[in-house]
Image (tube, coloured by chain):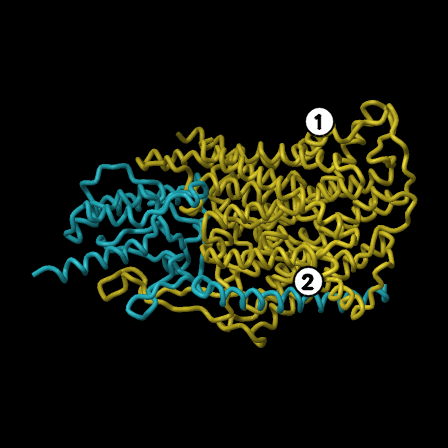
Chain colours: A yellow, B cyan
Amino acid sequence: MMPHAWTILGFYLLVLLLAAKPLGSYIANVMEGRPILALRLGGGLEAGLYRLCGVKRDEEMGWLRYALAILLFNLLGALAVYALQRLQVWLPLNPQQLANVSPDSAFNTAISFATNTNWQGYAGESTMGHLTQMLGLAVQNFLSAATGIAVAVALMRGFARHSASTIGNAWVDLTRVTLYLLLPIALVYAVFLVSQGTIQTLDGYQEVTTLESGPASVAPQTQTLPTGPVASQEAIKMLGTNGGGFFNANSAHPYENPTPLTNIIQMLSIFLIPAALCLTFGRIVGDVRQGWAVLAAMTVLFVVMAVVAMSVEQQSNPLLTSLGIDGSAGNLEGKETRFGSAESALFATITTLASCGAVNAMHDSFMPLGGFVTLWNMMLGEVVFGGVGSGLYGMLVFAVMAVFLAGLMIGRTPEYLGKKIEAHDIKMVSLTILVTPLLVLTGTALAVTLPAGVAGVANPGAHGFSEILYAFTSAANNNGSAFAGLSANTPFYNILLGIAMWFGRFIVIVSVLALAGNLAAKKRIAANAGTMPTHGPLFVMLLIGTVVLVGALNYVPALALGPVVEQLMLQSAH
Amino acid sequence: MTALIRPAVSLFLLLSVLTGILYPLAVTGIAQTLFPVTASGSLIVRDGRPVGSALIGQSFTDPKYFWGRPSATAGQPYNGAASGGSNLGPLNPALVEAVKERIAALKAADPDNQRPIPGDLVTASGSGLDPHISPAAAAYQVGRIARARRMEVERVAILVARNTEGRQFGLFGEPRVNVLALNLALDAEDGLADSMRP
């Protein structure tokens, strides 16, 4: 890895950890309703919303009621996105008169955005009108992110409370996350993006005559420049680890991610809330060291994956250098000049670990080992930073699994944060951990056996298999990035991937809330000499080991058929 | 369950208005007031009409212009209405074939140039709209441009240097040259020289 790549990685980590600490405390204050300045400023608006909605702020919910509220709220979101797509030609703010979206594509996109996946079978600039983008897709960018954070906070309360029957009020949690966390940061962030070149307009597309145009030229005579309320959507797309691009090229598009500065800020904003939530967790359970331990495990895994991806992509493709080109800048197919190979590989690592799914380079054209990293990052279960909220609740589930494994090894009843871990807890944990591999592997198996699945493949050989595996891994883990050569905008993929996204999101959410409810009801037991401390390096290593082991055991056979074979073929080809 | 429906529906509608209408309109208002040029797409205007965007690349095929990176957009290269990359895998024979063709085209336009061709000049970008090439890719083309325009090599090289951006704040991204801006500068310099000729 070249010195520049180390510098960028070091800078990234430094800024991320410095920003995470105060934000983590802030989120804890907001979610606990402490009388901080922001809550006093927004108190009137918040109280007004509750009055209009018939919400009683102090009314607590048990886990089942909390889960029903979350499911209902997200179902409404999916229905709204579906309706906006199916009706857009008759609605305002569609200057290009883009047609209504087909039922299967609209179904897929509605689920995709409601589940914080933001898988995109469509190309934004030729499919979605401005109103669908801002009132459909961008709204879900906020609300699906708020859902993830609310569920994570509910699980934190499960650990923090004892002998309790409730885990919070879903309406209050969703409202507070949106009002005090997502909206204010997104507003400032969006204006910053515009200052760098991201567009923000409600006008129609513009036609320009190109410089080389003329009777003698073979180059296109005109160029269409797309428009739209991009910056406002871009900000929450990154901040809420949504990742759905306004345009087809996503964050590779110069109108979404215009400069290297916006690129580093976009990368930081993906991990910002997931990192901060670790420290919120520490605050809410009353022991900040617990939060740092989880954050440390995530950081170690991230650095390893980033170093591998950056090293691989900074090498050029040997099949191309053998043609006599200068490959010193690395593998540039599918990458932008302004970002280069290092900062594209770093972006790819972050976006796949974080279940964000925004891309600033085309993962399909990564070298086999680079593609391997992006795939495996998602297969770890999107718990290394992970999606906003979902990353932390996923990682805490792994933490419970880790103490359970340690308990088995030494023959003691496992405990975590003063809570005895019992059979019901482990059932919920197992369900959470196993549901996504089941969806990924069943979906992939179906698609490679059925003609409708194989028909979508763009690249020959092992890479074609990787495209299908990537699609189901991305959908079930709610990431949303793609090996985008796959033609996925067909009824087969739209429906199957839609199912994978929905269950990958909500089976996990319901079982996590069930776990939270069960934990909250338990008594707190005092630590004694036999209690394994869960804030030291030993536990961090144990947690890393559990995540890696589960990720590896589930997926090694599938990975062997895809990127591993491809790497071996590359080595034998030159 | 029924007790949940009223808060669910009303909270969803109110938060939709807040985040889906008021928020984007507020950003649009602020953006169009503070940064009207970038908010509307960073258009470059020459002689009163827009000739393109400073952020969106254009297709160049004439030997007297610097060429940008190959573009894999659907329909036509640098199609602003259909951004995207080739999505060719690293071992795909189609990728190797495409690169071979691009190498042949560059060599045909400049047969005496023996330098190795920089990778970015023969690989398609992720957006298909990449406005930049590397300084090496610009340097590779200087000889051809000078010959096609009957300009001195040094004058072309000076224009390249003037249009080269380093890493942002010396830290982020890669050094790069904006192809459309460079070609506009080239036309301007050439036109100036023409008007001074007797």
Find residue A537 and name its label. Answer: 1
Q: Where residue A241 sits in the image (x, y, percent)?
A: 62, 50
Q: Element at badge 2? A: helix
Q: Residue at x 70, y 54 (%)?
A: A502
Q: Which residue corresponds to mark 2?
A: A78
Q: Where does the image place residue B136, in percent across and percent down from the top left?
A: 31, 41
Residue appearing at x 76%, y 67% in the figure: A49
Q: Is residue B64 left or right of residue A21?
A: left
User: Relative to A451, is A76 on the left or the right?
Assistant: right
In the image, residue A171 sits, relative to residue A528, either above or below, namely: below
Residue A39 appears in the rendering: yes
The relative height of residue A375 versus residue A122 in the rendered view (above or below) is above
Q: Residue at x 85, y 56 (%)?
A: A65
Residue A382 appears in view:
no
**Disc 1 sits on a residue from what chain?**
A
Tag on residue A112?
none
Depth check, mark 1 against mark 2: the one in front is 1
Query: Of B83 and B197, which appears nearest the observer?
Result: B197
